[in-house]
C-alpha cells in the first residue's frame, strides 16, 4: 500500500494490533472500507409505523463470537406486528428499535476461541441466546429458557443492519449449494419443522395446514419433507393458495368459497385429518381445526390470535380425545432444516415474493403491512 492512504492504513494497523489489522483488511476487501469508518447503516423503527436510519459502530466480536456481514434479513409477522402496533403482549417497543430476526450472511471475522468457522463461511444465524443452565436448557428445551436474548424482541435490537456479532455456536455453516438468502429463511423454516416434530408428522398421514402465510407454507413443506402423504392448505387469499400449490401442496381450500370442514371430511372419506397445523391464529380456523380433526389425532397451534385468546368447542375435542400441542419458536432444528434445503427437499427461495434493499426498509415495512394479500414473504437485501 503506497501513499498517504497506505500510510494511514499502516498507522491504524499499528494502533490496533494484528487482529485489528486483519479485520481492517477484510473490511477493505469486502465493503467500502467500512471498518476504517467504523460505522454501519442501521434501519430503525422510530415510532409506530415509522422507520428511519442511523449510523452505528460496527460491533467487535467477543472471543466466542463471529462478525457476520449480513446479506439478507427476512421480514417476519412479528416484525410487522411491532411496526404496526408497537407491542406484542408484554413486549413493548421503545424507539429507536431495530427489527429483524431472520438473518443470513458471511463471516468476516472470528473470535479467538472459535474453531469451526472461518472468514468467508456462509452462515444462517439462530437468533436466540439462552442461559444454558436453567431447568429448560438442561433438559434440552432451550427455546423455553426464561432468560433468552432474542433478536428483535424488546428490549433486544434486531438485525436490520449491515453487520452483527453473534455467538459462533448459533451460526450454522451453509453448504456450498445453499445461498445466504436461503440461510435467512432457515429461521421461519425451523418453526415449521418444529411444528411438524411436535405433531409427530410421518409417512401415511393426511394433514391440513390452516393459513398460507410464510409459516403456513414452511410448515407444509416441512410436513412433506417428513413424508406426510397428503398435505392440504387452507386460506382465504388466492395468491397464497397458488403459492402453496407451487411449493408442493396436495391441494388447497379457499375458506371464503368453500365449507372447509366439509371439504376436509370429503378428502378424508369422512374420517377427518390425521394432523392439523394451525398457523392463521384466528378463532374460526382454530375451531375448524377441532371440527375437522380425526378422532385421536393431533392439532398443533402455531399462530397467535390478535387478542391472545380463542374459544374452542371443547366438548367435541373431548369426545374425539384430541391432543393439543403448541409451538414456541424451535429447538435443535437448524441442522435438520439446512440439510433438507441442501438435499432439495425444501424450496425456500420459492416462498419469497418481494425483495427490498436496506435503503428501502421503510417501504418494505409499509408495503408488507398494507399489501398482505400479495406479499407472501418479503426480504431485505442488506448487501448486494
Image (cartoon, rainbow, N blue to C red):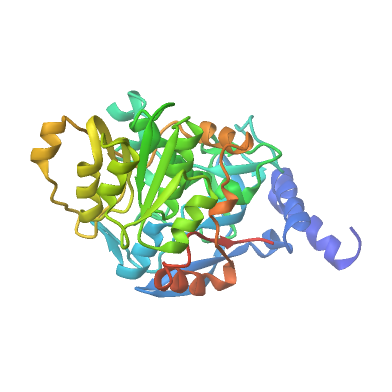
Q: Quadrant of residue 157?
A: bottom left
Q: Residue at x 35, y 42 (%)?
A: 208
Which residue is depicted at the point 66% across and 61% down? Answer: 383
Q: Residue furthest right?
A: 2
Please give the name of the residue rendered at 68% of the width and 59% of the height, measured from the top-left corner: 35
Image coordinates for residue 255, horizontal then vertical, percent? 31, 58
Tell me: residue 96, above or below residue 328: below
For residue 323, side relative to residue 12 (left or right): left
Report the front residue among 278 and 171.
278
Examine the rendered structure and indicate whether residue 227 appears above or below residue 216.
Answer: above
**On the rendered structure, is 148 left or right of 323?**
right
* Residue 130 visible from this viewpoint: no
Above or below — where is 181 with respect to 44?
above
Left/right of residue 164 with respect to residue 241 in the rendered view: right
Q: In which quadrant of the rendered image does the C terminus lie?
A: bottom right
What residue is rendered at 49% in x and 59% in y? 377
- Residue extending farthest left: 315
Q: Is residue 220 left or right of residue 338?
A: left
Question: Residue 6, position in %: x, y?
Answer: 85, 61
Image quarter of residue 140: top left
Residue at the far top in the pictured view? 139
Residue 220, visible in the rendered structure: yes
Toward the viewer: 302 or 278? 278
Q: Nearer the viewer, residue 236 or 91?
A: 236
Q: Position of residue 185 (x, y in %)?
A: 53, 48
* Residue in front for this viewpoint, 221 or 38: 221
Image coordinates of residue 147 in percent, x first then y, are 31, 40
Amino acid at each position: 500500500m503506497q501513499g498517504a492512504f497506505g500510510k494511514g492504513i499502516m498507522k491504524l494497523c499499528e494502533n490496533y494490533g494484528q487482529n485489528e489489522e486483519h479485520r481492517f483488511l477484510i473490511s477493505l476487501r469486502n465493503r467500502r472500507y467500512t471498518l476504517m469508518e467504523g460505522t454501519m447503516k442501521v434501519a430503525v423503527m422510530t415510532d409506530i409505523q415509522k422507520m428511519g436510519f442511523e449510523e452505528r459502530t460496527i460491533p467487535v466480536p467477543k472471543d466466542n463470537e463471529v462478525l457476520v456481514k449480513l446479506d439478507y434479513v427476512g421480514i417476519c409477522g412479528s416484525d410487522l406486528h411491532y411496526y404496526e402496533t408497537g407491542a406484542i403482549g408484554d413486549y413493548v417497543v421503545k424507539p429507536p428499535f431495530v427489527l429483524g430476526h431472520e438473518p443470513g450472511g458471511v463471516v468476516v471475522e472470528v473470535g479467538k476461541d472459535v474453531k469451526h468457522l472461518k472468514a468467508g463461511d456462509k452462515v444462517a444465524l439462530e437468533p436466540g441466546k439462552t442461559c444454558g443452565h436453567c431447568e429448560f436448557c438442561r433438559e434440552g428445551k432451550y427455546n423455553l429458557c426464561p432468560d433468552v436474548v432474542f433478536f428483535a424482541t424488546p428490549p433486544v435490537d434486531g438485525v436490520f443492519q449491515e453487520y452483527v456479532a453473534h455467538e459462533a455456536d448459533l451460526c450454522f455453516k451453509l453448504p456450498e449449494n445453499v445461498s445466504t438468502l436461503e440461510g435467512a429463511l432457515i429461521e421461519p423454516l425451523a418453526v415449521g419443522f418444529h411444528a411438524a416434530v411436535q405433531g409427530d408428522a410421518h409417512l401415511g398421514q393426511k394433514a391440513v395446514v390452516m393459513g398460507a402465510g410464510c409459516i403456513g407454507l414452511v410448515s407444509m413443506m416441512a410436513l412433506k419433507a417428513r413424508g406426510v402423504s397428503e398435505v392440504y392448505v387452507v386460506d382465504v387469499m388466492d395468491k397464497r393458495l397458488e403459492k402453496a400449490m407451487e411449493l408442493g401442496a396436495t391441494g388447497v381450500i379457499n375458506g371464503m368459497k368453500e365449507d372447509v370442514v366439509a371439504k376436509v371430511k370429503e378428502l378424508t372419506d369422512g374420517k377427518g385429518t390425521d394432523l392439523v397445523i394451525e398457523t392463521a391464529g384466528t378463532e374460526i380456523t382454530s375451531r375448524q381445526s377441532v371440527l375437522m380433526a380425526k378422532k385421536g389425532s393431533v392439532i398443533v397451534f402455531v399462530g397467535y390470535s390478535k387478542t391472545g385468546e380463542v374459544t374452542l368447542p371443547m366438548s367435541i375435542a373431548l369426545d374425539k380425545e384430541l391432543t393439543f400441542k403448541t409451538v414456541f419458536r424451535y429447538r435443535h432444528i437448524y441442522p435438520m432444516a439446512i440439510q433438507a434445503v441442501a438435499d432439495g427437499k425444501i424450496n425456500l427461495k420459492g416462498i419469497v415474493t418481494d425483495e427490498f434493499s436496506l435503503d428501502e426498509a421503510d417501504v418494505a415495512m409499509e408495503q408488507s403491512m398494507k399489501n398482505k394479500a400479495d406479499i407472501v414473504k418479503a426480504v431485505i437485501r442488506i448487501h448486494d
